[in-house]
Amino acid sequence: MELPSGTAESDRPGVASIRCRRSIAIVAGLVVAASVVCLLPRWWCGREADAWFRGDSVRVHGLAEELVAFEAEDDRQRAAGFGALDGMWGLLAHQMTALGLAQVVLAHPEWRGRYAPIATRAATKSLLPQMRSIFTDAWHGEDCLAHLDSAHGHAYLSYPALALGMARLVDPAFPPDLAEQLDAIVASFERRLLAAPTALIDTYPGEAYPTDVAAVAAAIAVHGRATGADHTAVLEHWAQQVRAVQIDRGTGLVIQRMGADGRAHDAPRASGTGLAAYFAGFADRALAAQLANVLFHQERNVLGFSAVHEYGHGHSGPGDMDSGPVILGISVSATGFALAPARAFGHRDIFTRLFRTTDLLGLPVRSGDRLRFATGGVIGNALLLAFLTSGPELAR
């Protein structure tokens, strides 16, 4: 068929219509593909966030059982004399396991018989000398338990003390000799905190970590709940000095390291603030909420996945053991720590965004009745059990 003179084939109405429809189809396909790319990972990684936020028993039980298995294997390795996890990482793993299991019992009293004895066993192991050897060496051989009357802070002892206090709170069979030892530890902390004008006591010689001192306050507060002892004066002193001395005025974040005199040795950072918010939740709900709200201002949200920026405005620096890797300013540790206050204070949207990132990077794997996050190892799973079960029942 011949075209009218001067008319190109591309100018024919039918051809133009086909090309228009083809262009629309391509654009629509790109929109659909982009939507799938953006929305599918967001949905997939967040599909269990609401269940965790609600404390769903299946999820909680699965992760708790993973830590029960860890403690059983650790018992076997200790009996055999090799392979057990010791040092600072062992302290952290057993302490957080004890905290997580105790929190599970508070939320699910029907599981007390299963988890309370294991919480006590894990907490007891966190007090072993080999767990704190790095700190004893730093104090030139001065062991904290042998020198409870010392003026030295030994704030790291708060980690096993808090674990023991939570185990004591939930375990009717908590050993009396261990309770007596815990009473002495808490009394020494109370004396040291009240004697410190800044409410800062050192972890290493000349180095105080406000986060560790928040754990001291938590241990004291939980001791009061377990025994009925009145620790109001020391807890009020601590909370007042956190606000007056330990929080950076410009950012609202907790200063990571300080001298006992209140001078900053590091920047205000989100990893310290996040963990301090978790510990403060045991001792002073209002202060914990204040720290949590500042922490949430560090949230960075991309396509529904959240992470937490480590350094406050005007500050920068590298990552370290506290923050974990810092990539483009984002802290792995601070992101995980933020789960606890997000759940405890009912921030469902923030919790969901943080959980998506945790799910994406943590790679949850279910095996039988157990659940674990594959990339975190035992320490990551212990931390997540504590943070994912942190709730409003902790501080009263």
Image (tube, helix red, strand yellow):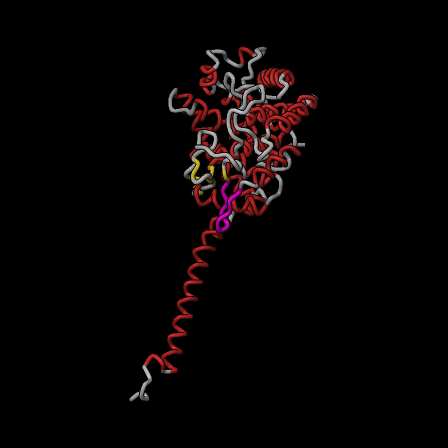
Q: Nearer the viewer, residue 111 or 203?
A: 203
Q: Nearer the viewer, residue 270 or 109?
A: 270
| Horizontal side of residue 216 vs 230, given as left or right | left
Residue closest to the far left:
2
Majority secondary structure of the magenta segment? strand
Residue that appears at 62% across and 19% down: 193
Instruction: Check if residue 302 falls in the magenta segment.
Output: yes
Q: Is 99 situated above or below 296?
A: above
Picture coordinates of residue 280 (x, y %)? 61, 30
- The answer to whether one can see residue 113 in this image is no
Q: Nearer the viewer, residue 181 or 269?
A: 269
Total residue callouts: 0
Picture coordinates of residue 278 (x, y %)? 58, 33
- The answer to whether one can see residue 181 in this image is yes
Picture coordinates of residue 305 (x, y %)? 49, 47
Q: Is 225 situated above or below 205?
A: below
Q: Residue 261 is drawn in which quadrant? A: top right
Picture coordinates of residue 205 (x, y %)? 50, 16
Residue range (magenta):
299-308
| Horizontal side of residue 90 vs 149, given as left or right | left
| Horizontal side of residue 68 vs 342, given as left or right | left
Residue closest to the far front:
6
Q: Residue 387 is drawn in which quadrant? A: top right
Instruction: Check if residue 168 falls in the magenta segment.
Output: no
Residue that appears at 68% across and 32% down: 396
Q: Looking at the rendering, in which quadrant would you find the N terminus? A: bottom left
Q: Is 343 situated above or below 89?
A: below
Q: Nearer the viewer, residue 133 or 63?
A: 133
